[in-house]
Image: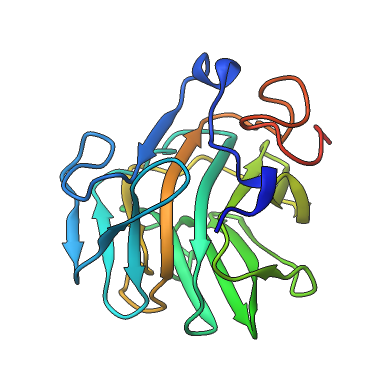
Amino acid sequence: MLAGAGAAALGGPAAARLRETLWTLDRLERIGGHAPQVLGAPKLSDSPWGPAAAFDGEDDALLVPEHPLAGAGAFTIEALIRPDGGRIEQRWLHLAQDAEDPGVSGGTRMLFEIRVAGAGWYLDAFIKGPGYALTLVAPEKLHPLGEWRRVTQVCDGRRYAAFVDGVLQAQGQVDFKPQGPGRTSIGVRMNRVDWFRGAIRELRFMPQAVWPGAVDGHQGGPSGVGAGSP
């Protein structure tokens, strides 16, 4: 089910001029020029924009041998997702640096999760590395299950914020440092727990801070839905 204008397709004329990586999950054998490792049996599901990868919340995932934001001093991650319920804690995107950083428990990483609460869900975004760690979560901001949403996390090196359909969910201050080369897990944590139940159509990675509403210079339309630039 399409959740109103907030789930507009990612991209747009201005976004195309940015140096970015777009992964469209409309097939399972190739993602962003890579042949992913397929766990379980993810399938293709319908979305308003075409096929999307669907995960069963039990053992489905896609592992891509690339950290698409390695080396970036600021970043934006956008995604089109449809959470469908299941267990309370679900990690659906996990970017992990391969090299270990001393003192960073669990490894240097950035990720997206959801928390399922009754008939709804709320967003959880997280980054961690040498000298920084910050969780963005707002349990009071619930969204209905079974609907497509555009979710975003943005970091300009100091400010870190998360959005759903362009509406701010949570934010904080962080002393972010670029992460190194690594891998990406879609549909599960890198250590294969907290499986995602739902579908993902697109993942967009930009090595700069692009606040919702600022990509096209106006509110509404592709990549400009909801709140304007902070």
Where residue 151 appears, x then y in whole percent?
A: 60, 50
- Is residue 107 visible in the rendered structure shown here? no
Quadrant showing the N terminus: bottom right
Identify the residue at image location x=35%, y=58%: 186
Instruction: Pick the residue in front: 118 or 177.
Output: 118
Identify the residue at image location x=46%, y=69%: 91
Above or below, 27 relative to 120: above
Quadrant showing the C terminus: top right
Above or below, 4 relative to 13: below
- Is residue 213 visible in the rendered structure shown here? yes
Which of the 4 image quadrants contains residue 93?
Answer: bottom left
* Left or right side of 220 for 117: left
* Left or right side of 209 for 206: left
Identify the residue at image location x=18%, y=61%: 38
Where residue 86 appears, x then y in whole percent?
A: 47, 82
Q: How is the image coloured?
A: rainbow
Which of the 4 image quadrants contains residue 199?
Answer: bottom left
Instruction: Pick the residue in front: 118 or 189.
Output: 118
Above or below, 209 relative to 94: above
Above or below, 140 relative to 159: below
Where residue 97 appears, x then y in whole percent?
A: 37, 51
Instruction: Pick the residue in front: 184 or 83.
Output: 83
* Left or right side of 86 for 158: right
Where residue 219 appears, x then y in whole percent?
A: 78, 29
Identify the residue at image location x=47%, y=38%: 204
> How many callouts does the rendering have?
0
